[in-house]
Amino acid sequence: MTAARASVWRRKLMGPKDKWRQKRQVFHTFIRGRTDVDPSILQTIRADMPRTYPRIEWMQDVRSKIQDLLVSYAAVQRGDGYLQGFNYIMSILLCVFDGTEYEEADTWWCFARIVGLIRPMMPDFNTTWFHWYRTHWLDEFHTRLRKKRPRVESILATDAEIFSSLVTVKWFMIWFAQNVSFEEIFILWDFIIEQKAERLMHVYTLIAYQLVLECATTVTYRWSQEPSRLMHAILNMKVTGIESVIVNVRRLL
């Protein structure tokens, strides 16, 4: 990763620069090495690690470090604990800060900030909050899609509640980490991280809209008679050329 990217992410996610030293001290004094978590959480984290970017060679060398960071976060932030998907977020962040002087501390604090931003996407954190955000993005998404791809929109509308709940968790909560290749996910996160917190839901919606537009013709042809399979195909699509998606989203902002 480039030093420039690490610098930007640090600046955007860690708050004022004059607080970085204090945060790093807090991490090394009170957070690093914490393992006092429920055994079930530890078991889940351990089970998820081998499934986290298994084809990326770099992961083989840092998997234990990522696991330790996730455990320490769950120990400190008991209200969040650990959710499946956190493993992707922590891995992407560590990759950006890997080899820097304060890689673990900066990774941990940036992770904490991202979790703060995505809390509305966590259905168990605040159900009312979750459903308000889900309904909000769903209305905008379907309104836009209906104008451009009415056939796809009509199919997805039949299972709108299920689709919107899954997208919120599988796409928005982990910032599309399972859909965009590891090599390109950093480009998308550069774009998301630069957005103001109050605009994030709008940005998530526009990215989702662009992704569905990209695959609409193919998936509609194959799954028009099988809505549940259409939903599965969209949710699990693999995205390449994310820069063109970002360009189109910028035009809509």
Image: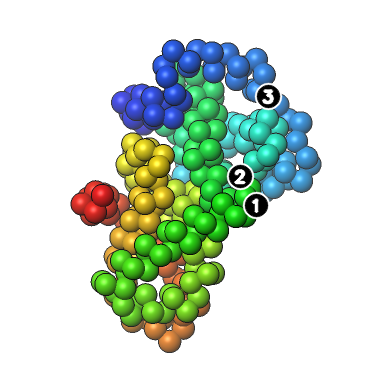
The residues tagged by marks 2 and 3 sit, at their Cα atoms, a distance apart of 18 Å
First along the sequence among labels 1 and 2:
2
Residue type beneath disc 1: Asp
Nearer the observer: mark 1 or 2; the answer is 1
Dots 3, 1 in contact, CB < 8 A: no
**Element type where label 3 sits in the image:** loop
**Mark in front: 3 vs 1:** 1
| SS of the residue under disc 2 | helix
Residue visible at 44% across and 24% down? 15
Displayed quadrant of residue 128? bottom right
Distance from Cα at disc 3 to Cα at disc 1: 27 Å
Q: In what element is the residue under mark 1?
A: loop
Q: Is residue 27 above or below residue 225?
A: above
Whether residue 167 appears in this view of the structure is: no
Type of the residue with mark 3: Gly
Crowding at mark 3 (Cα within 10 Å: few <14, some 14-19, many 20+): some
Mark 3 lies on residue: 33
